[in-house]
Image: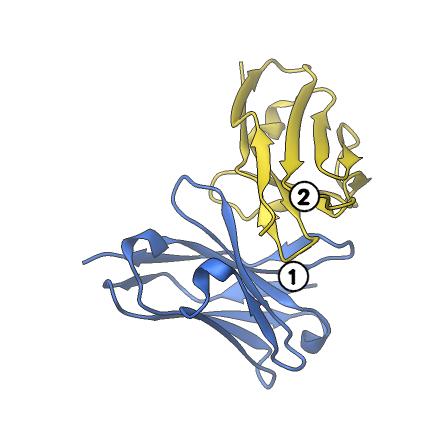
Chain colours: A yellow, B blue
Amino acid sequence: DIQMTQSPSSLSASVGDRVTITCQASQDISNYLNWYQQKPGKAPKLLIYDASNLETGVPSRFSGSGSGTDFTFTISSLQPEDIATYYCQQYDNHLTFGGGTKVEIK
Amino acid sequence: QVQLVQSGAEVKKPGASVKVSCKASGYTFTSYYMHWVRQAPGQGLEWMGIINPSGGSTSYAQKLQGRVTMTRDTSTSTVYMELSSLRSEDTAVYYCARKGQAVGLGYWGQGTLVTVSS
């Protein structure tokens, strides 16, 4: 099974800050990686697909990059509504999610 | 519009089985595979498996092999996930989800809380 290691597990940042989350796959997954946002009590929401493509309707302050085993998710200017937990997910072989990153406002 | 509507919360005793349903509407049921994902309280997301509603073929997470069964009823556009030999660690919210316009899981059910407790 492909393992996904996400870091950090939590972070605290100020409104307007740039926030970066990393995700590492245990083997080469090309660009078969998605990013989701999950707010408490809600189902996850797809933000980024194929490592770097913005899902329709998602604000442009969200972005993703990477390929192979190392991936990055960025919020260019953190907004209060971005408080949530973020997950990476590979789909090269079945699906595997990273452990999640809880983003809070400082 | 695409909708995935799941069955209600369940409380089960250890060793029992649970069957959760996910009724799809707003699209051609047999055109999209359906995934099941679960989330234990305060924990991350865990992929459980996938079913092809067209032919009924399935693929399950290795960890759940032998305990999970996914089926579908094309006459009602409903997929089912049955988990047997329940233990406390199976307490979680269970989601059905399918691909959206892009390759990710763009549509999700509302989730079904399954509580396993003696």
Seen in the picture, residue A98 relative to B79 is either above or below; the reply is: above
Q: Position of residue A89 (x, y in %)?
A: 64, 45
Badge 1 crowding class, 10 Å Cα cut-off, few under 14, some 14 to 19, many 20 or more, is many
Q: Are marks 1 and 2 on the same chain?
A: no
Label at residue B98: 1
Mark 1: amino acid: Arg
Q: How many numbered marks appear?
A: 2
Q: Position of residue A18 (x, y in %)?
A: 70, 17
Mark 2: amino acid: Gln
Image-based side of A23 in relation to B94, left or right: right
Label 1 resides on the chain identified as B
Q: Which residue is mark 2?
A: A27
Towards the viewer: B101 or B49: B49
Label at residue B39: none
- Tell me, yes or no, if residue A86 can be seen here: no
Q: Residue at x 52, y 28 (%)?
A: A9
Seen in the picture, residue B85 relative to A93 is either above or below; the reply is: below
Dot 2 falls on a residue whose secondary structure is loop
Seen in the picture, residue B53 relative to B63 is either above or below; the reply is: below
